[in-house]
Image: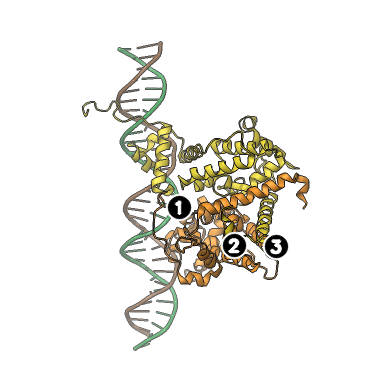
Chain colours: A orange, B yellow, C brown, D green
DNA sequence: AACGGTAGGTGTACGCCGTATACCTGTCAA
DNA sequence: TTGACAGGTATACGGCGTACACCTACCGTT
């Protein structure tokens, strides 16, 4: 076996093998010590070899996120919306907890990855199947924030666009491409529904401040209710 | 003026001047292009000069966070808790919006900085002054997550501890030092109250899964209520 | 059987990064 | 006058992402 030198001794690289190795490496040693060099070493390969399969490190991270998000359970088609959402979110939480680096990675990426969008789209679909208007579904998505993904974050916060200056650059927010609407129909619907007076667009087309206060007030109202009815930890087993 | 060479031509460095310059640089060019070298250049100084005033880049980031969090309005002592919290959170949001890099910076730090802890402590205090038990105040802090800071995040998520492996390392969670209790009395109280059966500790002493579901159910209940009462965007001006 | 193209792994190099270490210089107390 | 010390400097190291040129084993075509 040592004879057959150089021919097919080591299994060939592939985007998939790279992503899995990257996820495993991040799980074991933390995201901050995931470098192209370390990853290549783990795969028994020279760093530049990776670049034949992923464009750069950012794309690698996106791929890793998609691996994790792909582990979230599929929706149960027949359940009541509330139960369906609850289960789905808890499944997301489990998936993300297996990969503690994932929340920070998701937050730090500039745009949501396809798998994340697909997941969000299907959650919106569940709300709508439960009779929610596109309008309400939209606010509700903001309210849940990244809790929908099993952690917490304002997913659509425009100011988060990591790179450039805090000065809200007045780039004309491109209308969302038709291919987007085809792939993520529910997201597209709430996005266009959100275009109150603004242009129709996914990100800055909605009123961030309103969404924030909507969520905040919903929380405060819920908290007030608990307080008024004298909640104690005895209620734990609800 | 050109004669008086070298004596006091440039204003001397100081930790404060460094932090302010760092915040300004991050505001203008984004956190990812804030390097010790760029910052030093902006200050007309050699990179290593910074290290006489800050220990390393992590400490610099902590200092920057404290600058931002320090801009949050002080609490209004006499207001109803709900109004007080609401205003405070919206003030936090404004402060953070002036520095779009701040949320990600806060999230990526391993531990909360003193200014963040002080702010959280005073929010807990507001809840308790409004008649909340330490117990309920604790859950409520989790529920609001980093929305309390004007964005959104599970502040106490143990799995977030960026560095090490995802395997929940069973380090004995050190009892919180008495000096902590002195500086952040309200936090200390809800932390010890959270030690249901566990050891008394700030982080892992509480049941993350319970806190997550508590918040999730509060949200879902609130959402259900909106849905049942036929909420539409006509309610916007509440 | 010979051959040219190509997919995929390699080697080297560049410009960044954070920061350890040693050094210098101006100020000020004794 | 001296000498300690605070604070700015110079140099250097190891690590990072990745551009670019190369090499090589395989393949379909002729």
Residue drawn at (63%, 39%), measured in percent from left and top? B80
Rendering coords of residue B142 (x, y %) = 64, 46
Badge 3 marks a residue whose secondary structure is helix
SS at mark 2 in the image = helix
Do discs 2 and 1 belong to a common subunit? yes
Is A98 left, or right, of B55 in this rendering? right
Q: Please give the residue where the numbered disc 2 appears in the rendered image.
A: A137
- Which of the marked residues, 2 or 1, is nearer the chain's N terminus? 2
Residue B157 visible? The answer is no
Q: Is residue C26 left or right of residue A50?
A: left
Q: Residue A186: image x %, image y %?
A: 56, 68
In front: B73, or A235? B73
Q: Is residue B162 above or below residue A53?
A: above
Chain designation of label 1: A
Q: Position of residue B29 (x, y in %)?
A: 39, 48
Q: Residues within 10 Å of mark 2 (few under 14, many from 20)?
A: many
Q: Name the residue beneath numbered marker 3.
A: A83
Q: Chain of mark 3?
A: A
Q: The disc numbered 2 marks a residue on which chain?
A: A
Task: Indicate the position of residue B9 as horizontal and vertical percent values.
Answer: 28, 29
Q: Mark 3: few, some, or many residues within 10 Å (few <14, many ≥20)? A: few
Q: Is residue A195 left or right of residue B198?
A: left
- Find numbered disc 1 in the image and state the secondary structure of the residue it sits on: loop
Q: Are marks 1 and 3 in contact (CB under 8 Å)?
A: no
Q: CA distance from mark 2 to mark 1?
A: 27 Å
First in sequence, mark 1 or 3: give its number: 3
Above or below, comparing residue A16 to residue B136 in the picture: below
Residue A199, placed above or below residue D12: below
């Amino acid at each position: 076996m040592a004879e057959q030198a150089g021919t097919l001794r080591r299994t060939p690289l592939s985007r998939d093998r790279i992503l899995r190795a990257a996820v495993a490496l991040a799980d074991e040693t933390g995201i901050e010590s995931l470098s192209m060099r370390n990853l290549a070493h783990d795969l028994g390969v020279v760093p530049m070899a990776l670049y034949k399969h992923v464009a750069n490190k950012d794309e690698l991270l996106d791929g890793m996120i998609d691996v994790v998000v792909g582990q979230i359970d599929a929706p149960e088609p027949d359940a009541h919306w509330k139960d369906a959402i609850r289960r789905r979110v808890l499944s997301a939480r489990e998936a993300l907890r297996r990969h503690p680096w994932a929340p920070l990675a998701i937050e730090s990426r500039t745009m949501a990855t396809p798998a994340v969008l697909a997941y969000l789209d299907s959650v919106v679909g569940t709300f709508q199947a439960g009779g929610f208007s596109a309008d309400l579904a939209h606010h509700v998505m903001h309210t849940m924030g990244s809790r929908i993904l099993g952690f917490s974050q304002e997913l659509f916060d425009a100011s988060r666009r990591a790179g450039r200056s805090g000065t809200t650059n007045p780039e004309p927010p491109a209308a969302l491409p038709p291919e987007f609407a085809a792939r993520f129909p529910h997201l597209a619907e709430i996005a266009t529904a959100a275009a109150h007076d603004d242009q129709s667009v996914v990100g800055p087309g909605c009123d961030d401040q309103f969404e924030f206060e909507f969520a905040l007030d919903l929380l405060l109202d819920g908290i007030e209710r608990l307080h008024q009815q004298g909640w104690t930890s005895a209620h734990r087993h609800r």
